[in-house]
Image (tube, coloured by chain):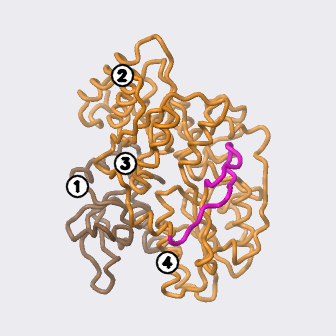
Chain colours: A orange, B brown
Amino acid sequence: MRFVDEFREPALISKAAEEIRRLTGTERHYRMMEVCGGHTHAIYRFGLKDILPENIELIHGPGCPVCVLPMGRIDDGLSIAQRSDVIFAAFGDMMRVPGTQGSPLEHKARGMDVRIVYSPSDALKLARLNPDKHVMFFAIGFETTAPSTALTMMRAKAEGVGNFSVFCNHVTIIPAIRAILDSPDMRLDAFIGPGHVSTVIGCRPYEWIAQNERKPIVVSGFEPLDMLQSIVMLLRQLKAGEAKVENQYKRVVPWEGNRAALRAMAEVFQLRPYFEWRGLGFISQSALRVNDKYAEWDAEQRFAVPGIRVTDPKAAQCGEVLKGVLKPHQCKLFGRECTPEHPIGALMVSSEGSCAAYHNYEHRKAGMVSLNSVA
Amino acid sequence: MCLAIPGKIVEISSDNQDSALVDVVGVRRKIDLGLLQDDKPAPGDWVLIHVGFAMSKISEQDAADQMNTLWMLGEIDGAMQEIQGYGLEDVN
């Protein structure tokens, strides 16, 4: 198998897979949620399911920021950018996400000034370069990305850049996990915790999951060996009847997180009382808005926002897939009307969306890297 | 977009301590160090970069591991496109 060389330490992968089989046994079924979209991508890419015992089920979590954004927010952002003096700036991930009247890219084709930026600071740079225009940065992301938006706004304020604003869609991971745990149709045994979100928030915010909900959680890296080791750590806890927060990704994630990043977020943002998540509905205190100190750089306070609410296309079952109730291929539109080339739901747009990941690797078995021969 | 890209600090701007030139497999771009205020990197240090900001200091070995992860995930092209795009160099 030609892919074998790609994996570092195949002997360790094989050992971890064996340990998982030993710990799992055959008596019961384990349901583990990987919270982060990056992990979902890795699971499909590496064909992890193929080497895990059948009684371990991995449920894909809400940690793909593009996927959980309700369509109404895209419509709201685009409606502001209808003004001829506004430049709509966003990350590449956002460009093909459908709004009611098409994606940002389709709006660009119809004449809207839409630009891809790779950093919020480049959106600010765009504002400096275009003094007669207003640059609105359409911000998305969890705590991994929110500090960069915050610091960019602090710089805009310090420099007095008046033609720049942020349309803030930043969300926070903890309330989403809480909503999932509160959901009556969701039974989970353990969590694979997000990697890079945790570089910012650290491991402490997960403690309630262990202490109050009695569910183990292991913050994990993204390599196959990382994820297998995390599953071993979760199984050991479950076998011992324990529920702890553990950090498998110590080489990158400090237990306390990044305090400077948290300070920047606290300076600029405050919690919204509630925010709508695609598939999960309204979740209280689950998203960030710009606080009054930065009102001048807040697109929502600066422009009239229609507050559009759109129900997802009826036939698409994004909500059920997002909650892990349905697998991607069980959606009626999967692979037919809805494909990565013509996405109907956001889960098919981002490589971190479970539908796109499933379609790209599992469905086609193309580009998939197989661990089978190693394990 | 939650995957971070490893880079090596080449130099810190003399006029702005929060701005540094990084090298990511031969591509050099400016990034922002403002989120590492409590633990400032120096030239020669490795950092994980996300949307133009250094998020954490890492070891050289971890940087190599992270690059390997991106490669295994088929995300190298996307990562390099992101790095090349910093500073609006290749877009707009």
Q: CA distance from mark 2 to mark 4?
A: 47 Å
Tell me what residue is drawn at x 74 percent, y 61 percent: A75
Measured from the top left, where is residue A144 in percent x and y? 46, 57
Same chain for labels 1 and 2? Say yes or no. no
Query: Disc 2 sits on a residue from what chain?
Result: A
User: Depth-wise, is mark 3 or mark 1 nearer the camera?
Assistant: 1
- Look at the image and tell me in which quarter the N terminus of chain A lies: top left
Q: Which mark is residue B59?
A: 1
Tell me which amino acid carries mark 4: Met
Q: Position of residue A86 (x, y in %)?
A: 67, 78
Discs 3 and 1 share one subunit? yes
Tag 2: amino acid: Ile
A135 in relation to A259, above or below: below
How packed is label 1: few (under 14 Cα within 10 Å), some, or many (20 or more)?
some
Residue at mark 3: B70
Q: Which residue is mark 2?
A: A20
Task: Please identify, in this view, whether the residue under mark 1 or under mark 4 is nearer the observer.
Answer: 4
